[in-house]
Image (spheres, rainbow, N blue to C red):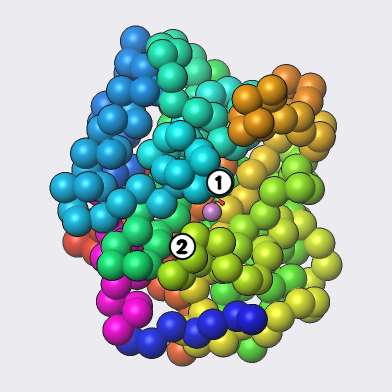
Amino acid sequence: MISTKSERELVLMKEAGRIVALTHEAIKNAIRPGITTKELDQIAYEVITSHDATPSFKGYYGYPGSICASINDVLVHGIPDNTQLKDGDIISIDIGACYKGYHGDSAWTYVVGQVDEKTLDLMEVTKQSLFEGLKQAKPGNRIGDISHAIGEHVHAHGYTVPMDYTGHGVGSKLHEDPVIPNYGPAGRGVILKEGMTLAVEPMVHMGKPQTKTMSDGWTVKTKDGSLCAHYEHSIVITKDGYEILTKIPELEVTNG
Ligand code: MF3
Ligand code: CO
């Protein structure tokens, strides 16, 4: 079942999204060589809880962190620990916040110090694929139109999409229907309606699309060790398009 949200629910989701975006700002400003992912997790916990919200991921199926912090060839679900960031790393930070029962969910990939051109290209293509997908987010279009636009953009640049991780509906649960693949044919799937709230989240590999899960049961890496990137926004479908929920309304640009 895919829910559409009421005005009252959307007010709460916008606040949850704003808190997620504020947390991204704080993390972006803290990222530097030498800081540990645990320290970033602590910053996120403080920002989220100081805004009357709770970290959506903490305790979700037993997940121990407030954020996911996924370095280089870690695709998703990197658990914050004592690993120090190094110059030349990239790190995908995934943040969820729950405000008065409603979730916001957004991921962004950040550079640590200086990275090479190839890495910047992977990041740029992944970020752009999110916005290519979002261009298709409007009433009357289908989920497959979003998926197709993402996959086409990624493949046109010679990168790949892991097939086993997807975007999703978001709302009073972190993960709601529908599933939003990052590839596939246009014109298929659920028809989008005003008031649906979706987390669109392309994940992209520089090399082959296969993944492997580490023995901690969480950390997912590219199987071939290639770099990967991840960008995600929570959105609401509006009368004629979409609005990003995981933003700071007074800022033009969100996150990175
Ligand atoms: N943000 C992830 C997603 O977009 C969920 C993190 S899973 C958790 O689906 F268990 F780590 F919370
Ligand atoms: Co998500």
| 71 to the left or right of 113 | right
Decide whether residue 58 is among the magenta residues.
Answer: no
On the image, the x and y values in percent for residue 66 come to 38, 39
Secondary structure state at the residue bearing disc 2: strand
CB at disc 2 and ligand 2 closer than 8 Å: yes
| 249 to the left or right of 148 | left
Q: Report the disc number at residue 234.
A: 2
Q: Residues within 10 Å of mark 2 (few under 14, many from 20)?
A: many
Secondary structure state at the residue bearing disc 1: helix
Nearer the N terminus, badge 1 or badge 2? 1
Q: Magenta stretch? A: 8-22
On the image, the x and y values in percent for residue 122 come to 61, 34
* Residue displayed at 70% across by 35% down: 205
* Residue displayed at 36% across by 23% down: 38
* Residue at mark 1: 61
CB at disc 1 and ligand 1 closer than 8 Å: yes
At label 2, which amino acid type do we have?
Ser
Evaluate whether residue 108 shows in this view.
Answer: no
Where does ligand 2 appear, by image quarter? bottom right
Evaluate whether residue 162 shows in this view.
Answer: yes
The N terminus, quarter of image: bottom right
Characterize the magenta stretch by its predominant secondary structure. Answer: helix
At label 1, which amino acid type do we have?
Tyr
* Residue displayed at 81% across by 34% down: 210
Residue 156 position (above or below residue 188): above
